[in-house]
Amino acid sequence: MESAGTRASPRARMPRIVGLAWMAITLVAGAWGYAIGGSSDGYWERRASILLEEESAMIGGDLVFEEKERLVNQMLMKAKHKEIDDAFIHKATFLPSQSFLLVSDKIRESPVFKIIEQMPKGAVLHTHDTAIGSSDYLFSNVTFRPNLYMCDLNGQLWFQFFDKPDRKDCNWQLLSELRKKDTNNLIDQRISRQLTMVTEQPEKTYPDSTIAWTKFIDIFRLITPMLTYRPVYEDYFYHGLLDLYNDNVFYIELRSTLPTLYELDGTKYGPIEVALIYKKVTERFMQDYPHFLGMKLIYAPIRSMETAQFNESLKVALELKRTMPNFFAGFDLVGFEEQGPPLINFADQIRTLDDGIFRFFHAGETDWYGTNTDENLVDALMLNTKRIGHGYAILKHPELLKYARNKKVAIEISPISNQVLVLVKDLRNHPASVLFAENYPVIISNDDPGLWGSRGLSYDFYEAFVGMMSRNADLRALKQLAMNSILYSAMSDKEKNRAMEIWKNRWDEFIEKMNDDVLCKYSRL
Amino acid sequence: MESAGTRASPRARMPRIVGLAWMAITLVAGAWGYAIGGSSDGYWERRASILLEEESAMIGGDLVFEEKERLVNQMLMKAKHKEIDDAFIHKATFLPSQSFLLVSDKIRESPVFKIIEQMPKGAVLHTHDTAIGSSDYLFSNVTFRPNLYMCDLNGQLWFQFFDKPDRKDCNWQLLSELRKKDTNNLIDQRISRQLTMVTEQPEKTYPDSTIAWTKFIDIFRLITPMLTYRPVYEDYFYHGLLDLYNDNVFYIELRSTLPTLYELDGTKYGPIEVALIYKKVTERFMQDYPHFLGMKLIYAPIRSMETAQFNESLKVALELKRTMPNFFAGFDLVGFEEQGPPLINFADQIRTLDDGIFRFFHAGETDWYGTNTDENLVDALMLNTKRIGHGYAILKHPELLKYARNKKVAIEISPISNQVLVLVKDLRNHPASVLFAENYPVIISNDDPGLWGSRGLSYDFYEAFVGMMSRNADLRALKQLAMNSILYSAMSDKEKNRAMEIWKNRWDEFIEKMNDDVLCKYSRL
């Protein structure tokens, strides 16, 4: 028996010009030693040229290696090939084909992951505010704050900060007091379990998307009243930015429903005020971490709205645009797409909206080909969406895909999210493989990392790079992903230029550092 | 909450000409009543036109409904929509997203399946001889034949027909004698279990492709010595043809390793003689069932060969071509592709082969993108394969896909096989969805139905139609699949014309009968 996965890439990922030179060499050398003396029918030359063509067409395939990138690429590809080729023999070790809920610890140990972690990955463009931070932070920080009350209503937990509970709907008790009496930590165990989708039996716990979404939505139900206490909200967001910053992400576009925030004294903050709070915290964060480039806000109310409510939300969008034109990126709708309503229901209203309000619609986050949910892709694109949230189903719509490429509408891929929410089990079957193969405009994002034990962007980059791209996709693919996150952002051209410049400096530093590490390692030998 | 899957297709699958008329109407009526009075920006018209464009591009999308097909289509689509829309709400009821090993009984009850069963489906072009019959037949017929001996070697069962066991390698005992002593039927239970991949816990039993293939290959190990007893071989094949015939399939192209057959007196039959046996049995079957159009043979030895062995097999192919040019269709290699060797190893030898020997290579039956196994697709196409066996990975190779379309190289899709052998869990993620969306040359086949409790071709048609195609794909898609099975067969043009004519007559009969059924049903009301 022969291993079919262990031969090194014949082209070692050369840029086009080197590739041509190499092809010329193979004409003499007889391609890879298989056809010594050359092949009279040009078989090996044509074969090499097909593979070269494919690799040039891939994401990152038209980038040319810069000085010192080659050594980093060698390290990276050695690690990647080892990981894939080992798994090709011992299938159970391949991480992207297993649920992230089971293998996040193992991913953290992967040498490929460790390189990705250090890499400046640019921006996160699809992430939801109340899932940006880890459940550990929620548990160990937020739930231990003073004034947090808990109640159990028909077996369902509820949290809220109060000066003194002013609602009689439930038997509110101070969590700190409850904990004192709970010598066996049963309460804490219960809370921890309810804050996360992590489970030891993902397939049994979440056999289909509806069941996964039920749990997913229930976590938001649980945490929102706790998070929307204004001081917690600010801290949670700040902490979330820090997670991203520590993962070498330097800019984000945040989707928020702009929920009503509250103070203990009863003060409430409406959507515009909440947006201003985000702006202020971002500015504070940027003062503390000057290398962070900032954020923009995508206002994304929950899609299950009536017409009147929807009109209200459009007014909010206009007001955001008017009051903070640079901070406000645009409009979206969130929620379980399969439960609707579909975009088509709002199309008439959205078409009346000022073109200056950019759209970043979720669409096609579904396996149900040919349904209304699936057709959200049509409306999203027709309604001039700037990017597509998920677009999991877009491959089944070749015309839309062409349109997306032509109009430079990027597809926001969140591999782990799609897996946890049961669109796909083995990430090698994720349709983005094809988007990578053809270098479609894509960005990789993390969606709701805090809800499934992820953090930052590196895990999703890892899944895409190891599980969804070709074994031959290399450093340039990751570099292109980072650049795409700037190119397809809502930044102005001027902001983009600055961001690209800053990112490039950081990239060069990363390459430099990795080279130093390699040299250091060898000098020790 | 709104169901997003229950709206009927706005175009009700009209042919292009009707579609245009309908579009004209929508200009007046204001598309689907959403935009009463028409939309000044043409939104609804453009939207309808995009969807119409997509549906025209789909498999079957350029067929025009013939008289009486419409009524059948209405019945079919009513059943399909009900099945999908119910499952959209109650996800656990959707059959194509569950393992076939668990749901074959439920599929049999589906009204869509029942229509597909009655439909003349044309040909099966990718099926393996020693898996064509059901395990029930093997158990209840073959294992009860006289002279069948069994032995247990280190816990592994072996079977063989003997006059008297002449091998001392194992403690051979007459199975009929063993059964007499086995009052609790333990032996029969053990045999039954070992003859099939069916299990109540597919994901636990087959966590990855290697483990699934290990069991798969072990079944062949078990049954081959029992099947290759010449009288059994003939009966098993005859019975397999009958299963297909009863499922309204009328022509097949059979892949065979042409294993050595034996008689009780020690006579052995080599590959050419085995091919002749196939020819004779086919002729007998055609006499018994004159509507059956026949078969052609694809000689497909096991890929794990050394150079010398491989050269021998090419000689066999040449001899088959010489002695039975019309019966012999061409050459292929079988076995677990991921365990290699890859096609590239044989490329030089295959290129020396007479062009008159057609190739029907298995290629890309893998999830391992960018490995040697994956690159089999390149070699298969460059070695002028007439069709691609499986081609599961071809979507990740856009250049190859283009080439396949241009050269009319059909991709042989076997949905159930791909699922059982752990390439994909939920068939909605099967890449053929995209091939259907763009009307690539594809055929649907059954691969090894007997090994996983399938029978005939209808189950695979069902999975493709309900699970992999759009909710809107209709009767014309199934019709196109049937026509493709003739168009992309190895038949001569003359044979194809005759086959198409015969199939068309049967199709018209089917349509006629279905219309009668409907009328009958209504006349009873």
Image (cartoon, coloured by chain):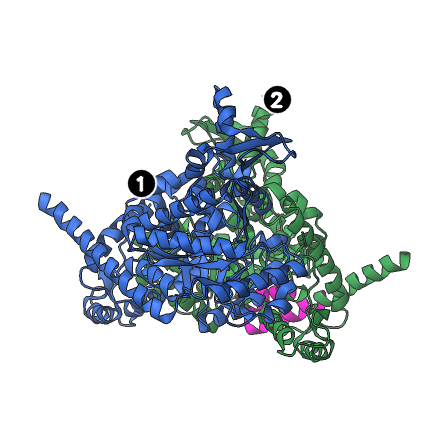
Chain colours: A green, B blue
Position of the C terminus of chain A by quadrant:
bottom right
Left or right: B78 with respect to A264?
left
Residue shown at the point (44%, 53%) measured from the top left: B278
Of residues B275 and A142, the one drawn nearer to the viewer in this rendering: B275
Residue A71, visible in the rendered structure: yes
Residue A8 position within the rendered picture, expressed as x and y whole percent measured from the top left = 71, 62
Single out the mark in the foreground, 2 or 1. Answer: 1
Per the image, label 2 sits on a secondary structure element best described as: loop
Residue A385 position within the rendered picture, expressed as x and y whole percent measured from the top left = 43, 65
In the image, residue A97 sits, relative to residue B324, either above or below, namely: above
Residue B109, label in figure = 1
Residue indicated by mark 2:
A184
Residue A147, visible in the rendered structure: no
| Residue type pointed to by label 2 | Asn
What span is colored magenta in the figure? A478-506
Q: Is residue A148 magenta?
A: no
The total of numbered circles placed on residues is 2
Of residues A482 and A367, the one drawn nearer to the viewer in this rendering: A367
Crowding at mark 1 (Cα within 10 Å: few <14, some 14-19, many 20+): few
Q: Is residue A500 magenta?
A: yes
Residues at marks 2 and 1, common chain? Answer: no
Residue shown at the point (65%, 33%) measured from the top left: B168
Residue A243 position within the rendered picture, expressed as x and y whole percent measured from the top left = 64, 50
Where on the picture, by quarter, is residue A232?
Answer: top right
